[in-house]
Amino acid sequence: MEESNVISKKWEIRKLSTVISITKGKKPRNLEANNTRYLIPYINIEAFEKGVFTQYTDGIDARTCDVTDILMVWDGARCGLVGKGVSGAIGSTLAKLDFQDFIPSFVFYFLQSHYDTINKNPRGIGIPHVDPNIFWNIQIPLPPLAEQERIVAKIEALFSQLEAGGAALRRAQAGLKRYKASLLKAACEGRLVPQDPSDEPAEVVLRRLGKSPLQDASLPSLPRGWCWVTMSEVADINLREPFIRNLPDDLLVTFVPMAAVNAEMGIIVKPEQRPLKEVRKGFTSFLEGDVIFAKITPCMENGKAAIVPKLHNGVGFGSTEFHVLRPRENVISQWLFYFVRRESFRVDAKASFTGTAGQLRVPAKFLASYPFPLPPLAEQERIVAELEQRLTVVAQVEAAIQAALTRSARLRQAILKRAFRGEL
């Protein structure tokens, strides 16, 4: 809690318990998923946070608010979050704040400045709730109404400047995302690096392995030395390793749960180690250099894929929701990985989903039959080297943008703290 001696001595200081009362929300008797019969929006947590109304009531047994009221999340993980600008029936996890002697925006911003205090010190086990002992003992300054107006105007002017900067940063993030997509597209079309006539053509290597190129007139043309194949011609899909059966049960191996794959970076983070006996059955096995690709929604759409790095004792297991692609001698792991990382590939994969809602998966046959542009091996190496050089720079810029956004969020809190100490 703020000590009163850090607040302007010109202001009277009150505890929230003396100036605010709450009206707790309540689930109405009648609710419907559309507004054909009932016209009053029900403000559940989704409506409160996103402005998306999915339920409506006739108002019987409801407690209502209007757009000028301040609401607070009283129950749940977001307890302490305040909002305004919505009208309707107050959801059962929310509370309306009633007060006098304050303008609503002053209370709104003041409580925003105390969100961490309220949210990180909840009451209850399981479902957290606002702790009344903390909330009601928070001290709030009581400036004259005219000064409250000036403070709110200053806060909003500074926040407007921050938001303009934040919007520019988010536009830059979106631009980098488009740039990464364009890099992968150019790479897969043979436009990222020049071709070298001395490279052994991919078709020559393919035929030496007893395979033939894919003949499909509907596919776009490729650079000289490239050829179309199906993915099953360049990778074994979900191959089982017989030698694993002969390994001892107490052998420690790497284990990769779905959560350990960073979708944004395309890498495995914080893998675990488990005895082989715990994962031998009921999990997916893979080896170093394999490409793992999430097959279930929403992990697949989110881009969960990675090249398997060095493994403990050379063996890895993971979620059964991974497809495992093992590159053959005519393709390198990185080229296969970058191909399946493309958003357009994931769009096509989503269109192939089978199963029921919530359990939709990409079937292995989709991967096996998907057309794959195969460059010469030497060109694959050059493409990957160029991609990684550029993507490294992109990652550095993205990190700088994220750091700036984080600083902006901290600056918002700093502005609020100064405002309510009378220092703006």
Image (cartoon, rainbow, N blue to C red):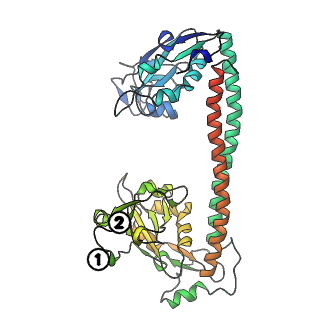
The picture quadrant where one finds residue 187 is bottom right
Q: Position of residue 284 (x, y in %)?
A: 36, 66
Circle 2/circle 1 CB separation < 8 Å? no
Give the camera-side residue of 275 and 369.
Answer: 275
State the image quarter where residue 222 is shown.
Answer: bottom right
Percent position of residue 291, x then y? 47, 69
Where residue 144 appears, as percent x and y from the top left, is 65, 8
Q: Is residue 78 above or below residue 303?
A: above
The residue at which mark 2 appears reads as 252
Task: Give the vertical position of 14 relative to 263 (above or below).
Answer: above
Quarter of the picture containing the C terminus is: top right
Amino acid type at image mark 2: Leu
Q: Looking at the image, is mark 2 or mark 1 earlier in the sequence?
A: 1
Q: Amino acid at mark 1?
A: Asn
Q: Residue at x 46, y 34 (%)?
A: 46
Q: Residues within 10 Å of mark 1 (few under 14, many from 20)?
A: few
Number of dots carrying numbers: 2
* Horizontal side of residue 161 vs 213, given as left or right: right
Q: Is residue 412 above or below residue 143?
A: below
Assess disc 2: are there few (<14), some (14-19) or many (≥20) residues with their C-alpha within 10 Å of its C-alpha: some
Q: CA distance from mark 2 to mark 1?
A: 14 Å
Residue positioned 57% across, 26% down in the render: 113
* Residue under label 1: 246
Relative depth, front residue between 409 and 196:
409
Give the percent coordinates (x, y) of residue 298: 44, 53
Q: Secondary structure at mark 2?
A: strand
Kindly state the secondary structure of the residue where label 1 is placed. helix
Q: Nearer the viewer, residue 324 or 422?
A: 422
- Closer to the eye: label 2 or 1: 2
